Image (cartoon, grey):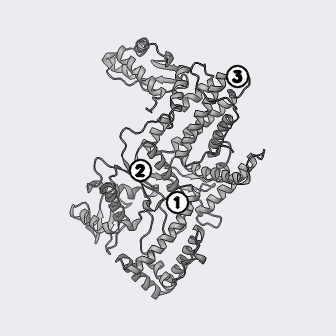
Amino acid sequence: MAPVTSLASTVDQRIADALSAALPQAGAADPLLRRSDRADFQANGILALAKQLKGNPRELATRVVAALAANDVIKDIEVSGPGFLNVTVTDRAITETLAARAADERLGVPYAEQPGTTVIDYAQPNVAKEMHVGHLRSAVIGAAMVELLEFTGEKVIRRHHIGDWGTQYGMLIQYLIEHPHELDHEDGAVDGESAMSALDRIYKASRAAFDSDQEFKERARDRVVALQSGDEQTRAHWQRFVDESKIYFYSVFDKLDMEIHDEDIVGESGYNDMLEETCRILEETGVAVRSEGALCVFFDDVKGPDGDPVPLIVKKSNGGYGYAATDLSAIRDRVRNLDATTLLYVVDARQALHFKMVFETARRAGWLGDGVKAVQLAFGTVLGKDGKPFKTREGETVRLVDLLDEAVERATAVVREKDKREQLSEPEIAERGVQVGIGAVKYADLSTSASRDYKFDLDQMVSLTGDTSVYLQYAYARARSILRRAGDARPVAHPELELAPAERALGLFVDQFGETLAEVVSTYEPHKLAAYLYQLASHFSTFYDQCKALDENNPPAVTENRLFFCDITARTLRQGLELLGIRAPDSL
């Protein structure tokens, strides 16, 4: 089915045509249409035109109104103030546009005109280390952007750049060689918790040995050399740590209701074979130079507190490779082998300078050409209620699994309390608790601008009121409940009917869904979709209070039309929540 033209686009085109007819000397003028509190839309473009044409703006506006042919879209248009055009659309246009959206499984949202290939780097835990609250935002924001981009028709390639390389593995591997059964599990059974428990035990024991036993420290350092040189036994033990960690990673991502696939995990080790060539190219082309034995890239606008240049170190003076070498090699791979047109990095804002320098280096080297853009979708920090970095009472970093389990526990209590009629079974309450709890955590993250810090407050997150996912899920469930209770009545659009104010407001807002998604994807700002969905749920709440769909005094056509508004709203809420990675249960 062809995409549906929004009312805003339709009105914009009608006024643009009238501008051309009334003021041909103005050329293809932009009406500068926007939403308005005084009418449905307001066109402000005539003020700029009046300056250009040296005319009276109200007089010009009056000529444009006269040039507007009678139509079934614009009900009323008036000149306001110094030359604004206040536009009210017909009720028929609202209902017919929504009916066209309802006939399409995509709700009339068009695909991108020129989709490309985005490689998105997100959800980057470290091998043999516990995932904590600091890993939440990259995973949640990244997963939402994957859904949003794919919905527009973009080809999306996921990359989880896990920390799976470095000197600490010499310590871990050497300890495992000397204690070969430390990663064994009883009866061969292993789950995420037991995998992490074993890894944590080995990490603490190996660290203690490394710090206290000089001979073990030397053996561990020798093991690093063996790992980097490709020794088979050493690599096999390293792989055990990676595989064990994946069991744990997958269990955490499963709690987050996210799918992570083996083929998408390409960690730091995946670029080892490219590092030397990357450095050689940078040095031969003059992009990088030697400084105090290290291979560095310098920038005019990056200086330290003393005013001296701060370089990007690609290769250290001892021959070791910095993070920059790996990140630059990853760019080469993603552009050359994956045909990326966009590289999107969902990474902590504190790494902004690093990525600024990496991207600029890649541009100087020609790896980021005119047809490829690199973007860091930087995110802020998760804070506690006190506005300080989120820690346990003991001052330790909060484990991500503990946080998610507590969210589900709180949400389950809310669902049980809401289910006063005891319509849900215990398994259903448990299922809803997971959907509501995980949705609450995700929405709290996604409803905040990614670049900002936010306070993690579970009491607020699982509230039925306010800007929460529970409020949105409840609005969806309420709409579905109305449709279930409608008996033989079915949702049918009736464009001939006059709409109540709450119906008009709801209909006009539903029609903004496609425009909102286009903006969200173009700016990589999923919080704008969350804001849209919250406002949509608020409009539906007003509609629910003022326009009773199942009132026995309604004529059949009114009932059918209001059921239609319930249905199109529910579908829009559900689609929007799905794009944010949040479940929408039919009942709460």
Q: Three-letter amino acid code at disc 1? A: His
Q: Secondary structure at mark 2?
A: strand
Circle 2 crowding by C-alpha within 10 Å: few under 14, some 14–19, many from 20: some
The x and y percentages for residue 121 are: 43, 56
Name the residue that disc number 1 marks.
135
Which image quadrant for residue 407? bottom right
Whether residue 295 can be seen here: yes
Image: 311 above or below 380: below
Which image quadrant for residue 584? top right
The x and y percentages for residue 273 are: 32, 69
Single out the mark in the foreground, 1 or 3.
3
Q: Three-letter amino acid code at disc 3? A: Asn
Name the residue that disc number 2 marks.
156
Name the residue that disc number 3 marks.
554
Left or right of 465, for residue 365? left
Q: Secondary structure at mark 1?
A: helix
Residue that appears at 64% across and 67% down: 394
Give the mark, 3 or 2, whose residue is nearer the N terminus: 2
Circle 3 crowding by C-alpha within 10 Å: few under 14, some 14–19, many from 20: few
Q: Secondary structure at mark 3?
A: loop
- Is the C terminus in the top left, top right, bottom left or bottom right quadrant? top right
Q: Nearer the viewer, residue 560 or 169?
A: 560
Single out the mark in the foreground, 1 or 2.
2
Give the mark, 1 or 2, whose residue is nearer the N terminus: 1
Give the mark, 1 or 3, whose residue is nearer the N terminus: 1
C-alpha distance separating marks 1 and 3? 52 Å
